[in-house]
Amino acid sequence: MVVGFIVMALEAPCCFFCIDYVNDVATQVEQRPLWNRAAFYCVIAIPPIILCPGLGSIFACGLVFGTGVIYGLMGLGKKASAEEMRQAAVQSGLAGTPGATTNDRASIVNNAQPFSFTGAVGTDSNV
């Protein structure tokens, strides 16, 4: 219940217009980086599940934890365009030329080892 109050106070301070300091706290939290809010939501979602592992606690705190994950992903930022990622791969030397054996599948095939048995093979039950 406390976790729900905290999330509501930070996300929708207009619901608590009768409490003066809620709007001030929400404004201060808005000024912090997104990863701070993400870490806070993920941390406050864990203790209720540990203390009372019921379905209601798991569902409610799972939603709060999911909100923290979403804020964390928002804090990472927008993904680069395909061309920018391609240029970064070429500059780092990870991008191989066509036909070269530097990609993952080629190294898997080149490093393949035959199966071996350490002892005699048992009889097959034909199942």
Image (cartoon, rainbow, N blue to C red):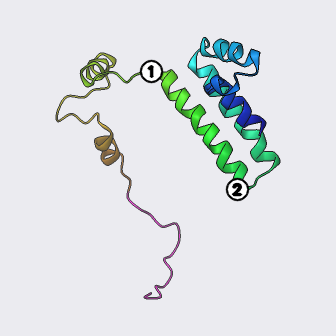
Q: Give whichever of 97, 75 is nearer the camera.
A: 75
Which image quarter holds the C terminus?
A: bottom left
Q: How crowded is mark 2: few (under 14 residues within 10 Å), some or many (20 or more)?
A: few
Q: Earlier in the sequence, mark 1 or mark 2?
A: 2
Q: Which label lies toward us, 1 or 2?
A: 2
Instruction: Judge whether 100 appears above or below 25 on screen.
Output: below
Residue 26: give x, y in percent of width and height.
Answer: 66, 18
**Residue 23 image offset from top left, x and y in percent:** 68, 16
- Most foreground residue, 85 or 110: 85
Main SS of residues in magenta: loop
User: Disc 2 residue type?
Assistant: Leu
Which disc, if any, is residue 55? 2
Q: Where is residue 1 in the image (x, y as percent from the top left)?
A: 77, 40
Q: What stretch is highlighted in magenta?
A: 114-127
Where is residue 35 shown, x and y percent of the image?
59, 21
Residue placed at 33% from the left, 39% from the top?
Answer: 104
Label 1: which residue? 77
The residue lying furthest to the bottom in this view is 126
| Residue at position x 75%, y 16% in the image | 20
